[in-house]
Image (cartoon, helix red, strand yellow):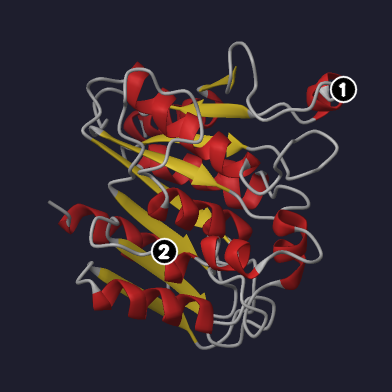
């Protein structure tokens, strides 16, 4: 009984053991001159979760919640995921990124990506003992994770030490991948790219069209009955990865729709356990 109580206390302490830092200690990039007051309400932050030393792995995971680029589902696609990661020995970092807005950004299409790149830079620079940095993103957060994966060679932030911005692995959970009208999530597209984006911009932010052999391995999760973000998004990204021989796998549900987070209530299957097992197989 005493041992059980000790374990419970340890798990409770995991949930509370977090630190919150501003993503940028000084100047935030890509901001308009009149945006500082607005930024205070939406200042990008990183919520840091660490595992107890006795179970800690040398792997960190950046968690990117979704929300259609109009809000951020910080709880069930952010903090809840981080809590599960630290219980399994991973360091977790939940990203509160800037929502794309012409009111605070010179170029709103790259604002969230800048924040994701800055997060990877901070994680690597402040944790030299970390050997791998992965990313897991949900819905529009999955789109942000996919752009982080595919655009890592172009630095959208100051990176004087040339820290690698490439994730070592990715989990894309019911992700928005394409900005093409036939399968995209129209709200995410409009919020990120505007009402009438150029074809060049649409292609640039359709991650299936930006895949190279250097892209990291990917674990997909999608429900076949997802009408908000059709599973074709995952299929197209998988086809692009297969074409250049990047390892990937898809975990499907027959039902569940969109936005179920860690638990798909229509099934007893637990995709998160499968994801962790997959991560353990990576070299």
Q: CA distance from mark 2 to mark 1?
A: 34 Å
Local SS, label 1: loop
Residue sitting farthest toward the left: 283
In the image, is residue 79 above or below residue 2? below
Q: Position of residue 135 (x, y in %)?
A: 41, 47
In the image, is residue 228 above or below residue 18? below
Q: How many marks are shown on the rendered structure?
A: 2
Q: Position of residue 250 (x, y in %)?
A: 36, 76
Residue lying at 60% horizontally and 52% vertically, measured from the top left:
77
Image quarter hosting the N terminus: top left
Quadrant housing residue 275:
bottom left
Q: Left or right: where does residue 206 sit relative to residue 171?
A: right
Q: Which residue has dot 1 on it?
A: 34
Quadrant housing residue 190:
bottom right
Q: Nearer the viewer, residue 254 or 40?
A: 40
Residue lying at 29% horizontally and 57% vertically, measured from the top left:
215
In the image, is residue 145 above or below residue 253? above
In the image, is residue 85 above or below residue 42? below
Q: Nearer the viewer, residue 226 or 98?
A: 98
Q: Left or right: where does residue 264 sit relative to residue 56?
A: right
Q: Residue 144, can we see it?
A: yes
Find residue 210 and name its label: 2
Q: Residue 270, can we see it?
A: no
Local SS, label 2: loop
Q: Mark 2 or mark 1, which has the lower sequence index?
A: 1
Say if mark 2 contacts mark 1, CB within 8 Å. Answer: no
**Dot 1, crowdedness within 10 Å: few (<14), some or many (≥20)?**
few
Q: Position of residue 261 (x, y in %)?
A: 58, 61
Q: Left or right: where does residue 157 sit relative to residue 194?
A: left
Residue lying at 23% horizontally and 71% vertically, measured from the top left:
244
**Dot 2, crowdedness within 10 Å: few (<14), some or many (≥20)?**
some
Quadrant housing residue 40:
top right
């Amino acid at each position: 009984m005493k041992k059980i109580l000790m374990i419970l206390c340890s798990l409770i302490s995991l949930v509370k053991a977090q630190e919150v830092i501003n993503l940028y200690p000084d100047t935030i990039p890509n901001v308009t001159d009149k945006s500082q007051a607005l930024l205070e309400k939406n200042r990008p932050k990183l919520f840091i979760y660490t595992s107890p030393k006795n179970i800690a792995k040398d792997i960190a995971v950046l968690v990117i919640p979704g929300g259609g680029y109009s809000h951020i589902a910080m709880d069930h696609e952010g903090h809840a995921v981080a809590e599960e990661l630290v219980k399994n020995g991973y360091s977790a970092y939940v990203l509160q990124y800037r929502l794309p807005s012409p009111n605070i950004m010179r170029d709103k299409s790259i604002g969230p990506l800048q924040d994701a790149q800055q997060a990877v830079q901070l994680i690597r620079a402040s944790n030299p003992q970390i050997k791998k940095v992965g990313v897991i993103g949900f819905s529009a957060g999955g789109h942000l994770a996919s752009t982080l994966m595919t655009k890592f060679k172009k630095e959208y932030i100051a990176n004087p030490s040339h820290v690698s911005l490439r994730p070592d692995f990715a989990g894309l959970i019911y992700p928005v991948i394409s900005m093409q009208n036939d399968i995209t999530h129209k709200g995410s597209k409009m919020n990120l790219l505007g009402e009438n984006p150029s074809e060049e911009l649409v292609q640039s932010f359709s991650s299936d069209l930006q895949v190279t052999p250097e892209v990291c391995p990917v674990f997909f999760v999608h429900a076949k009955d997802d009408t908000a973000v059709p599973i074709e998004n995952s299929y197209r990204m998988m086809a692009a990865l297969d074409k250049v021989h990047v390892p990937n796998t898809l975990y499907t549900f027959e039902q569940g729709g969109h936005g179920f987070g860690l638990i798909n209530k229509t099934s007893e299957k637990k995709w998160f356990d499968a994801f962790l097992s997959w991560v353990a197989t990576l070299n």
